[in-house]
Image (cartoon, helix red, strand yellow):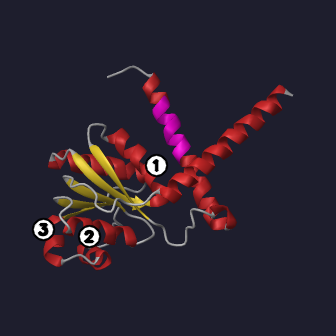
């Protein structure tokens, strides 16, 4: 009986957390005027909207350079230029392509290496709204001394308010929430270990 009650409580806590997570995604909107940072980084994904948003930030002078992290290894610079719709002179001078990242952990490692190489102390992070909470956790873990400003981009076809009504949206939100919890657990565990 006690085991069943504990399981029910754990399930309720998980469900409440999922609702809080989806509410956070629903309320996430990019700042109308994000602060100027040393650089801008965009994490690639299924949609080109985030690439265009990051390029607009660079063109508006919100960062000195833009890193596009997780670029398909078969893509050329011209391919990426066409997708970003960037102004060519700015693209040629100030856009760096990262080809090593295959997932969010890889994005964080690739971004940290780029920021260290450029001696940057602050970054604007552009990614999908539902992906932003986990991305920020991974990026903070990879480079704890760098200020990060979230610039979430709305995901096409994702109704964050009524996410449970469609199977594909419910699956996406639930899977992302579980991944987010895994990163939270990992970071909590690492904080228990020896310091330094």
* Residue 171 in the figure: left or right of residue 59: right
Find out whether residue 183 is within the magenta segment.
Answer: yes
- Specify few, some or many for label 1: CA neighbours under 10 Å numbering under 14, 14-19, or 20 or more: many
- Left or right of 117: which side holds 49? right
Q: Is residue 111 left or right of residue 187?
A: left
Quadrant into which the N terminus falls: top right
Instruction: Return the residue at label 3.
Output: 93
Query: Dividing the picture into quarters, in which one does residue 49 lie?
Result: bottom left
Q: Main secondary structure of the magenta part?
A: helix
Q: Could you say where residue 119 lies in the image, as x and y percent from the top left?
A: 15, 45
Residue range in magenta is 180-188
Q: Give the CA distance from mark 2 to mark 1.
A: 24 Å
Residue 153 drawn above or below residue 193 = below
Mark 1 and mark 3: Cα distance apart in space: 30 Å
**Point 67% across, 46% down: residue:** 15
- The reply to whether discs 2 and 3 touch (Cβ–Cβ < 8 Å) is no
Marks 2 and 3, how far apart in space? 15 Å
Which one is nearer the viewer's eye here, 71 or 85? 85
Q: Is 195 part of what is drawn in magenta?
A: no
Give the SS element for disc 3: helix
Q: Answer whether residue 74 is visible to the viewer in this image.
A: no
Tag count in the figure? 3
Q: Nearer the viewer, residue 186 or 61?
A: 61
Residue 43 occupies quadrant: bottom left
Question: Residue at left 17%, top 77%?
Answer: 88
Mark 1 — residue?
134
* Residue named by callout 2: 56
């Amino acid at each position: 009986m006690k085991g069943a009650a504990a399981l029910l409580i754990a399930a309720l806590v998980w469900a409440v957390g999922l609702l809080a997570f989806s509410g956070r995604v629903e309320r996430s909107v990019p700042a109308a005027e994000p602060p100027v940072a040393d650089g801008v980084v965009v994490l690639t994904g299924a949609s080109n909207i985030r690439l265009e948003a990051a390029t607009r930030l660079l063109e508006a002078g919100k960062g000195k350079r833009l890193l596009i992290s997780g670029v398909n290894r078969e893509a050329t610079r011209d391919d990426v230029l066409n997708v970003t719709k960037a102004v060519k002179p700015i693209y040629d001078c100030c856009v760096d392509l990262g080809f090593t990242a295959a997932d969010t952990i890889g994005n964080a490692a690739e971004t940290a290496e780029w920021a260290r190489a450029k001696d940057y102390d602050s970054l604007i992070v552009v990614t999908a709204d539902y992906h932003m909470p986990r991305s920020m956790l991974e990026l903070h873990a990879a480079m704890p001394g760098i200020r990060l400003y979230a610039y979430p981009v709305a995901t096409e076809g994702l109704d964050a308010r009524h996410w449970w009504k469609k199977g594909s949206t419910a699956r996406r939100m639930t899977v992302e929430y579980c991944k987010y919890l895994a990163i939270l657990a990992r970071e909590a565990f690492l904080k228990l270990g020896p310091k330094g």
